[in-house]
Amino acid sequence: MGVLKKFEQRLEGLVNGTFAKVFKSEVQPVEIAGALQRECDNNATIWNRDRTVVPNDFIVELSAPDYERLSPYSGQLGDELAGMVRDYAKQQRYTFMGPIKVHLEKADDLDTGLYRVRSRTLASSSNQQAPAAAPAAGQRPGGYGYPPAAPAGAPPMPAAPPPGAPGARPGGYGYPPAAGRPAGGGLAGAPQPGARTRHWIEINGTRHQISRPTLVLGRSTEADVRIDDPGVSRRHCEIRTGTPSTIQDLGSTNGIVVDGQHTTRATLRDGSRIVVGSTTVIYRQAEG
């Protein structure tokens, strides 16, 4: 069973208790859990052959309405999310520099249903053998969205491998996971010789492959992917795969939001967030 599914089942076990109101939020906890997984992948730093370090301190920024709904349960939710990160790291053989913590913060610039995740690596006192030297000009070790700083006394981190070399991990803060970028450091979605681009979407942890040039999302049973959401029109929008891939509103009642922007048509990239009604759809693409 996948880590996200286990996480969702643990939350469902609490749904009849004080945690029930969390599920009335526009942002669902399982969406945040998936974002934390991607944040680990994006910011994984290879120290040596046997150790890949990922962030252990996360901030989830929420819109004011979502924050108000979730904040009374932030302690419980933070603990459950931290447990999910721990399970995912074990599965991926990632390691941490310190204890895992997940915090919720309010962001006034976010609309309801949207969120951001920031992360950093904080070393525990047991890992800090000596005070760290002052960073060089322009260096920001361990900050939100930056690779972890090595503790004093640790062996030097290996130089980043050249693009396309074994161990190269394209991707980083604010970008899609490495899997969404082709080897060789090219941009996600850029055609590679002999490679075929795969396209899919993720809705509440469920993957839907896009095997045709177009994919219609809607509440109707005739839609290619049916979304059971009263805020979604029968034929709400259409994804068209290509270079680049695009999404087109089909005259829906409530419109679409793509990467935080209300629009009728937009270009999609790997990791684009599409909000239809109160449902979030993640667009994914990868070579191979």
Image (cartoon, rainbow, N blue to C red):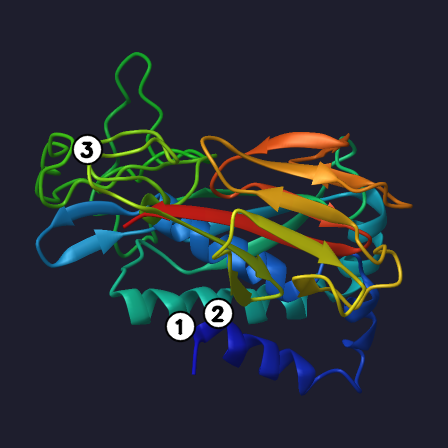
Q: In 3D space, how far apart are the residues under numbered discs 1 and 3 (Cα atoms)?
A: 30 Å
If the image is split into quadrants, where does the N terminus sit?
bottom left
Asked if 257 appears above or below 137 in the picture, the reply is below
Residue at the image position 83 percent from the left and 66 percent from the top: 24
Q: CA distance from mark 3 to mark 2?
A: 31 Å
Q: Amino acid at mark 3?
A: Gly
> Which residue was labeled with disc 1?
87
Residue sticking out furthest to the top:
137
In this rendering, the answer to whether 61 lies above or below 140 is below
Question: In which image quadrant can residue 225 be found?
Answer: bottom right
Where residue 151 sits: x, y (%)? 22, 42
Kindly indicate whether the residue at mark 1 contacts the one at mark 2 (C-beta within 8 angstroms).
yes
Mark 2 Cα within 10 Å, few/some/many (few <14, many 20+)? many
Q: Position of residue 21 (x, y in %)?
A: 83, 71
Q: Is residue 116 visible?
A: no
What secondary structure is found at the residue carrying circle 2?
A: helix
Tell how many labels. 3
Q: Residues within 10 Å of mark 1 (few under 14, many from 20)?
A: some
Near-viewer residue (234 or 137): 234
Which amino acid, by three-letter code, is at mark 1? Asp
The mark that comes first in sequence, 1 or 3, is 1
Q: Residue at x 36, y 51 (%)?
A: 41
> Residue 84: which disc?
2
Amino acid type at circle 2 is Met
Q: Position of residue 152 (x, y in %)?
A: 18, 40
Local crowd size for mark 3, using a 10 Å CA cut-off: few (<14), some (14–19), many (≥20): some
Residue assigned mark 3: 184
What is the secondary structure assignment of the residue under circle 3? loop
Q: Secondary structure at mark 1?
A: helix
- 193 relative to 252 in the view: left or right: left
